[in-house]
Image (cartoon, rainbow, N blue to C red):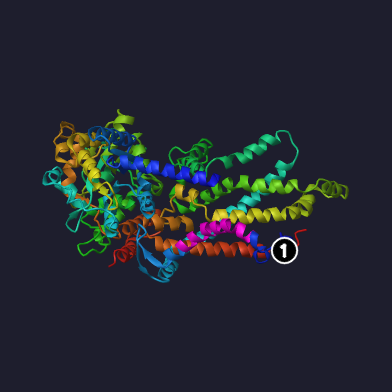
Amino acid sequence: MTRFKRITHLAAAAALSLASMAAAARADTVRITVSFYSAATGPYFEKMAAAFTAANPGHEVKIEVVNWPSLLQKLQTDIAGNANPDISIIGTRWLLDFVRDDLVEPLDGHMSADFRNRFIGTFLKPAEIKGKVYGLPIAASARALYYNKAMLTAAGMPDGPKTWDDVAAAAEKIKAAGGNGFGLMAKGTEVDVYWYYALWTHGGQVIGPDGKAAFNTPAGVKSLAMYKSFLDRGLTEPGPTDYTREDLQNQFKQGRLGMVITAPFLINQINKEVPNLQYGIAPVPTGTNAATYAVTDSVVMFKNSKVKDTAWKFLDFLFSAGPRIEFTKSEGFLPTTKAEAADPYFTGNERLQTFVNLLPNAQFAPTITGWEDTAKAVTNALQSVYLGTATPEAALKKAEDIANQALGK
Amino acid sequence: MAARRPTAIGVLPFPVLVMIAPSLLLAAFVILYPVWEILRLSVHEISRFGLVRGFVGWDNFTGVLADPSFRASLWRTLIWTGAVVGGTVLVSVPTAVILNLDFAGRGLARALVMLPWSVSLSMASIVWLWSFNADYGLINTILQSLGLIARGVPWMARPETAFPIEIAIGVIVSIPFTTTILLGGLASIPGDIYEAARIDGAGPLRQFRALTLPLLRNFINIAVVLNIIHVFNSFPIIWIMTQGGPDDGTHILITYLYDLAFRLGKPGPAAAISLIMLAILFAFTFLYLRLQPKDAS
């Protein structure tokens, strides 16, 4: 008796909810996962979602903000559980894994010529695989050397060091005055990249044109030996394997570190936290040539999304001039669209222009399988050299073998 | 337990079996499905996102076993487990004995010992990481003000300092649980046997060795086994403080497995490691319980 009653109730409830679902069928909900770049990231996307809903009544955008270090793992588990969002920010260097598993949608079909023309060409390239564009560059950054004005002026280089020899000479003087000269980063992410600055500016390469590891060369050994000699001569902070990028940036903000190579977003942090800090930004020091590292993060659309058209509409909105300028300004990234680059905020910003001017010599992380393994092998090699447990030659040889195995060569 | 053994499933009356079947099936599903999944992963080449690329047989296992980082992590896991569990028991037994004495403020002292338990392991690890920070960590500040060191020591920079620190933190966070078990054990020892021992002229040390320790043995065993299982698989301390680095020098199996699965995107070899870990843990526990003398009374 009671059981029968309950079943009818259930059926009624189910019918009701089906009916309400049918009524709402035309209102799409787009789910987007974004990475936490700063405290401003979440509010920015919430604001854009609200603006989008206002312009497209009925459609809704749900934002999920995830910390950068756990973003890939989060997507990995979401995808395995078939609970992934419709669109997501990813590191462009991860893209190949997504494409190989056929998880993300080529965007060429959605892009009009006019849309494509919004971007600065360099930044659309890294997300292109086999002639198809899979990601839109939402964030771009390059690397340059930040220097403490007071320390470098005292060392006789008020405009910052130009070459690695300048770095060493300035660091000697800073050390004599009781400070840390050159920040050497050897913990956390991008430990490998921090050495690539030296490798590239000595004419070296990470991956050769044949797809093999190419860092175990005289240029590689020389640049690593240079970093090691900085460490041994006390020109860096002691114990670099205890210092992440954030640790070094903190030291720099506190005026305890003379020079550090990092991304443009430190400008915004300094403006907010230590506006009185006197500092300058110079290109990555040169050895035999100039180089820097450029990196983009991309927005991708997942193949299994059921609301692709609305999702694209939202992306179209995000990559229009107004939202782009607001985003790039508040996060302190480099412009990826022409409209941003033409905005007075960027054209008049000398510090950001230093980064923009470096782009012609910039190296992007290649979209190849085995990049993460290579990064890890190189990171371990660098750490073993900094710890003094291996010579540059031996460490790079070992890393080369591991990397070539991962690269399938 | 032993007395109840005859009522095994085989002799249960039929209706009882029917009635417990649903929960039995549910439990089997919850336990067996993940094991089946891991078995499946471990013999296939799997993409980062869980796509099966092909059957590889034992390749994941042989690959892992040939990896020097795996072998180093395995060895370090044994050191980690032995040192943390051993250290915990060594500290917890006297702590429990003291907390079992009758003294003013005992309630407060017990609360203080238990307090770390209420802090999540991840939070505790982050706080400790800051305490050992080279530039503004509490530890360096104290050592500097005592004049023991001239400038900040980068504790986490070298595996030789980082790993022992991680072990020490592992001991500290394991004490509350272990002490609780031992206090329960001490409460079950009747007071009059101590009185009898005193009359017979046994001093405190003798009482401890001849009465307390033997009567506490079962509880120590439980504490050791539970701690081994827990510590062997303990992830947050090492991951948060050093992420297994520098140069893979502080990896234990569980952090190494995570690194493989999520940083390098290799679920297959990671699944192989987790099966190896399961086997080790089984063997460990079985052996330990086997080695204990049966007549605990």
Q: Is residue B249 above or below residue A279?
A: below
Residue extending farthest to the right is B199
Q: Is residue A71 above or below residue A151?
A: below
Whether residue A225 appears in this view of the structure is: yes
- Is residue A203 on the magenta stretch? no
Q: Position of residue B142 (x, y in %)?
A: 52, 37
Q: Position of residue A255 (x, y in %)?
A: 34, 34
Residue extending farthest to the front is A1
Q: Position of residue B168 (x, y in %)?
A: 55, 48
Secondary structure at numbered mark 1: loop
Left or right placement of residue B116 versus residue A335 in this view: right
Residue at (43% x, 39% y) in the render: B135
Near-viewer residue (A397 or B226): B226
Per the image, the residue denoted by label 1 is B293
Q: Position of residue A203 (x, y in %)?
A: 20, 56
- Three-letter amino acid code at the position of disc 1: Pro
* Magenta region, main secondary structure: helix
Q: Is residue B43 above or below residue A220?
A: below
Residue range (magenta):
B16-37
Q: Is residue A380 above or below residue A352?
A: below
Left or right placement of residue B146 versus residue A293 in this view: right
Near-viewer residue (A149 or A72): A72
Whether residue A172 appears in this view of the structure is: no
> Which part of the image, by quadrant, shows the C terminus of chain A?
bottom left
Dot 1 alpha-carbon crowd within 10 angstroms: few under 14, some 14 to 19, many 20 or more: few
Residue at (44% x, 45% y) in the render: A11
Near-viewer residue (A341 or A13): A13
Residue A265, by quadrant, is top left
The disc numbered 1 marks a residue on which chain? B
